[in-house]
Image (tube, grey):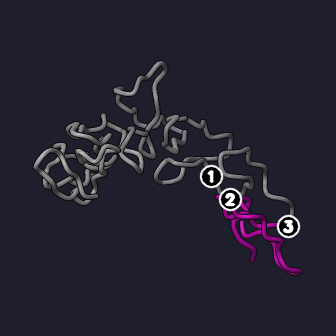
Amino acid sequence: NHWCFGDAEGYCAEGATLSEDRSSCSCNQGYSGPTNGDTCTKCEAEQLCPGGDIAPGDCPRGKTSNADHTACVYKPGYYAITNAGPTSDGERCPANSACPGGEAGAVITCSDNAMPNSDKTACKCTAGFTGPNNGACAACPANSACPGGDAQPQTCQPNSVPASPLAINCE
């Protein structure tokens, strides 16, 4: 990481890469600072930092930066409206839906007998029903208990019965 340009020379700062011709250093993705500067500053969680001498930028509402700070992605609980561009805000997840976040900003409408989990990132079957997360929920099988979520039905032991019509445990 040693650079030379004319009579000047130095070492690249942490978070910087030496140019191919060894004449300059520039900050890596996820860092910001001037070319050949003494420091490259690590970007904060919600900032875009493509590298070089480009100043960091903030992500729009409902978005955060990806792991390498090169793009804004949707936060869990937010989704993309139709025709949203990279500078568009994320929208809060609608009622009875899940929005896992990420690049696509998808919305999953919860099926019958399902509801979104507390952070609205997945649809889970309600008590008395069984099925995969974000999928269809079926009634709990006879003589079984279904606590909800993605838990498998639990067969009640001999001489016990489901505790209620919602069948969340056996008695």
Q: Residue at x 48, y 43 (%)?
A: 101
| Amino acid type at mark 2 | Asp
- Give how far apart the Cα atoms at labels 1 and 3 are: 22 Å
Crowd band around label 3 with a 10 angstrom C-alpha radius: few (<14), some (14–19), many (20+): some
Q: Position of residue 123 (x, y in %)?
A: 60, 47
Q: Position of residue 35 (x, y in %)?
A: 19, 43
Q: Are marks 1 and 3 in contact (CB under 8 Å)?
A: no
Q: Secondary structure at mark 1?
A: strand
| Amino acid type at mark 3 | Asn
Q: Which residue is mark 2?
A: 150
Q: Earlier in the sequence, mark 1 or mark 2?
A: 1
* Residue 4 placement, left or right of 148: left
Q: Secondary structure at mark 2?
A: loop
Q: Which residue is mark 3?
A: 143
- For this orientation, the residue located farthest to the front is 7
Secondary structure character of the magenta stretch overall: loop
- Give how far apart the Cα atoms at labels 2 and 3 are: 18 Å
* Residue 79 placement, left or right of 37: right
Crowd band around label 1 with a 10 angstrom C-alpha radius: few (<14), some (14–19), many (20+): many
| Amino acid type at mark 1 | Lys
Q: Nearer the viewer, mark 2 or mark 3?
A: 2
Q: Position of residue 10 (x, y in %)?
A: 16, 57
Q: Are marks 2 and 3 in contact (CB under 8 Å)?
A: no
